[in-house]
């Protein structure tokens, strides 16, 4: 039994040593909750060469109807790993293309959220309910990690 416990501990600590940094990190803060706004920062690391496409979800999980969540997003900006502003374009109403990055991209935007119903997002001074308000698809990247700061 003791050998089994030691073996399992060895595997656990070995795996922690090989853990990789997440390719995508989210930070959500609520500096203007009284006006139903969240500030969302998304950092993409190890972005392959070529344009990065950031897209918002168009539908709610478990439903097929379109809701166009991007309509509540404004102030979208992108920065490279050094903090320099990057040029963005809107190839369609649902997303942005970020070109000329250095392998790291940080996007910042404001989310307006005033409808608590299980489909849309809602923010006020007492709570935050987020649903489909973060980029749902990121072309050319792997797994995502979400970290929320309240």
Image: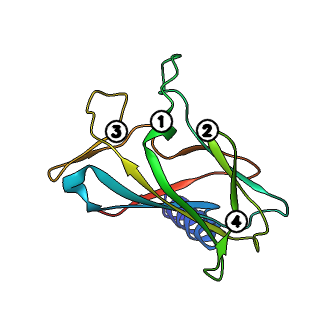
Q: Please report the residue visible at 52 percent of the width from the left and 27 percent of the height from the top.
A: 59
Give the secondary structure at mark 3: loop
Q: Is residue 61 left or right of residue 149?
A: right
Q: Which residue is mark 4?
A: 87
User: Of label 3 and label 4, which has the lower sequence position?
Assistant: 4
Q: Please report the residue visible at 60 percent of the width from the left and 80 percent of the height from the top.
A: 83
Front one among 37 and 5 = 37
* Residue 65 in the image: above or below residue 55: above
Give the secondary structure at mark 1: helix
Q: CA distance from mark 2 to mark 3?
A: 17 Å
User: Of label 1 and label 3, which has the lower sequence position?
Assistant: 1
* Residue 95 in the image: above or below residue 22: above
User: Of label 1 and label 2, which has the lower sequence position?
Assistant: 1
Residue at the extreme top of the image, as rendered: 64
Q: Please report the residue visible at 48 percent of the width from the left and 26 percent of the height from the top.
A: 67
Q: Which residue is mark 2?
A: 94
- Depth-wise, is mark 1 or mark 3 nearer the camera? 1
* Residue 145 in the image: above or below residue 17: above
The quadrant in which residue 93 appears is top right
Where in the figure is residue 13, as x and y percent of width and height? 56, 70
Q: CA distance from mark 4 to mark 2?
A: 17 Å
Q: CA distance from mark 1 to mark 2?
A: 8 Å
Crowdedness near tag 3: few (<14), some (14–19) or many (≥20) residues, C-alpha within 10 Å: many
Q: Is residue 37 left or right of residue 6?
A: left
Front one among 149 and 85 = 85
């Amino acid at each position: 039994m003791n050998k089994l416990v030691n073996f399992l501990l060895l595997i656990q600590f070995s795996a922690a040593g090989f853990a990789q940094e997440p390719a995508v990190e989210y930070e959500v803060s609520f500096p203007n909750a009284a006006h139903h706004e969240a500030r969302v920062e998304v950092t993409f690391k190890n972005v392959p060469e070529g344009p990065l496409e950031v897209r918002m979800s168009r539908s709610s999980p478990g439903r097929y109807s379109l809701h166009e969540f991007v309509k509540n997003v404004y102030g979208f900006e992108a920065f490279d790993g050094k903090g320099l502003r990057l040029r963005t374009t809107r190839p369609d109403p649902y997303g942005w293309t970020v070109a000329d990055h250095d392998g790291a991209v940080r996007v910042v935007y404001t989310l307006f959220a005033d409808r608590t119903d299980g489909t849309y997002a809602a923010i006020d001074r007492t709570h935050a309910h987020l649903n489909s308000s973060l980029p749902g698809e990121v072309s050319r990247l792997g797994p995502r990690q979400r970290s929320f700061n309240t």
